[in-house]
Structure formats: structure tokens, C-alpha cells
Amino acid sequence: MKIVVGDRNVLPHRAQFESGLPVGAEVVWVVPFDEARVLEELSDADVYVGGKFSAAMGAAAPRLRMVHVAGAGTDNVDRTGLAPEVLVRTTFHHEQSIAEYIVSATVMLRRKFLEQDRALRAGVFSTSVYDPSIPQPLSLSGARVGFVGFGHIGQRAWTLFEAFGCVGAAVTGSGTANGRLEWNSDTADLGKLMEWSDIVVVSAPLNDATRGLIGADELARLGRDGVLVNVGRGPLVQEQALFDALSDRAIAAAAVDVWYRYPGADGVGKPSSLPFEELPNILMTPHSSGVTHHTFVGRVADIAANISGLSARPRP
């Protein structure tokens, strides 16, 4: 069995990964990702591990049996070059790390720590202790947290928020939610959720029904003290509407970990056509909320186990 790995996040766990594979497996590491070299290696490969898979890669891989993403989404897997019997697998294990990001980002934004940090670097102690025009910031105690999507990420984040004394609610595609929430409904009640919430966490999947789900009206309903955290996909929130709401202080702040543009392999590029980086009330992170050692230890174990399971099956 030949396995081609094109995901650099797996490389730190190389020993763990290779020790979990079937005896005799050949592993070819193409890290950093180089599509030209991957195309060469795929001609006799059984498995490809990586987040980006193009139609050309599928066409170059006549023996391929599995594409395994080292993450939860298949957004960058082009299935047009794949035979119908080729398995596409994903793995999670990021819910704890993303939940930590959600709560810590919320605390930083509600407590105005970003603004205080920038001011203090310029020699200004920006706190109500020294400036009576600055209101005392808000803690999480009693805060209302609304979830747009309430899967494994939302549920894990809620367990952390609940420990701080928050109150929760959720809207989901199905209208159901597992957890000790004050209320839950389907997305027809999104406006109600935005008005009810002090903090809105967006972790819904991106599809035709959810693209652009949150726009100017929904953000206006969140209000001037509201904080938005998007860890789902960028286009769940309308790009211009979010920029305008932050610029005009229609909402207090946002933490955005998922974007509207992504770079090439060099990691260089603006995440939006709009200058979010000029705004003082946004925490910008490069889709890194789930990227921790903890996450990838679990993912690598899953990938190796799924490859071992595949090796036990006869080739069609």
C-alpha cells in the first residue's frame, strides 16, 4: 500500500502516524505541498492524505482508494476527478481547541483587552480607573450566548461558557439542540437569537442554505454591545455587512478565524478584499483555532486507523 501525505500538520506526528499503518506500507511525504510532485507520486498511490485535492490529482491517480482530509471539511476536495468508489474521509478532534479559542476570544473582546494592549504600548492606561469616560467592561457572568449551529464545536464551547455562569440558546438547521439551553429553534428564529444574545458563536456548516445567513439586519439586531465569533466558514457571515457593522460600531467587536480568501502554500495573502486589518475591534486569526498538538494527535490516530481498515478490504 502506497500513501502520499501532502499535509504539513501531520508531519510533526510522523512517528505516531507511521507506527499505526499496516505492515509494509510505503509513505511518501510531500511537505511542503507541491502539486507537481504529488501528481507524479499519485500514479500508483492507494491513499492521499491532505486538505487540498484537485481534479487533476484525481485524474492522475487511477489506483486511488481513499482521500483522507486531515481535518473536518472537504471544501477543497474536488471530486470530479475521482472514481465513485473512492472514499473521502474526514476527522475531527478539534472541538476542545476551538472551544478554548471561542471563550478566550470572547473574554478578550468583552473585557477590551485588545484595545487596552494597543493603548498601553503607546503609554496610555486605557481603563476606567484612570479615565472616567471609559465604562467598566463586561465579564461573562450572566451573559447570553447564542449559537448558530450547535454541533460538537458548539456543544463543547457551551460547556465552557456554562462554567462562567452564562445562559445559552441555539438555532440549528433541524431546530434541535442537545444541551442545557434556555431555548432552541430552527434558523427561522435567527433574528430572535441575534436580539436575545450578547455573544453569538457561528459554527454552522456552509452550504446553499447557510451561505450569507448573517447579514446587515442580523448584525444590527445583535446590537452595539454584541460580540460575534465566527469559527464556521467565512461566507456564513456576509463580508461587506460584517465590515460595515464593525466600522460603524453597530456591533462591539468580532473574532474571525475563517475567511473569504485563502493564500497559496506560502501562506501569504490578504484574507478579504476589505481592510479588516484597519479595524481596532476585531481579533483576526488565520483559521488556527483548532490547530493544536492535542487536535492533531487525535486526527493522526484516526487517519492511520482508517487506512488500516482500508487495507483489510479487498480491492474492488
Image: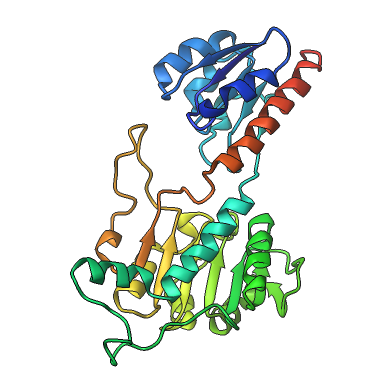
Q: How many marks are shown on the rendered structure?
A: 0
Residue 21's spot in the image, x, y percent? 70, 18
Q: Quadrant of residue 203?
A: bottom right
Above or below residue 2? Residue 112 is: below
267 and 191: which is toward the camera? 267
Colour convention: rainbow
Give above or below for 277 relative to 26.
below
Between residues 277 and 156, which one lies in front from this camera angle?
156
Q: Is residue 217 left or right of residue 188?
A: left
Residue in the foreground of this view, choosing between 53 and 150: 150
Q: Residue at x 47, y 17 (%)?
A: 38
Q: Residue 119: percent from the left, percent from the top?
A: 24, 71
3 w.r.t. 212: above or below? above
> Which residue is outermost to the right?
313
Q: Is residue 23 above or below residue 117?
A: above
Q: Position of residue 12 (x, y in %)?
A: 52, 28
Q: Name which quarter of the figure residue 157 lies in.
A: bottom right
Instruction: Name which residue lies at 40% across and 21% down.
Output: 34
Residue 190 percent location from the top left of the image: 59, 75
The quadrant the N terminus occupies is top right
Residue that extends furthest to the bottom in the rendered view of this protein: 132
Q: Residue 147 is drawn in which quadrant?
A: bottom right
Which residue is painted at 27% across and 59% down in the image? 277
The residue closer to the viewer here, 282 or 159, is 159
Asked if residue 206 shows in the view, the reply is no
Q: Is residue 283 left or right of residue 61?
A: left
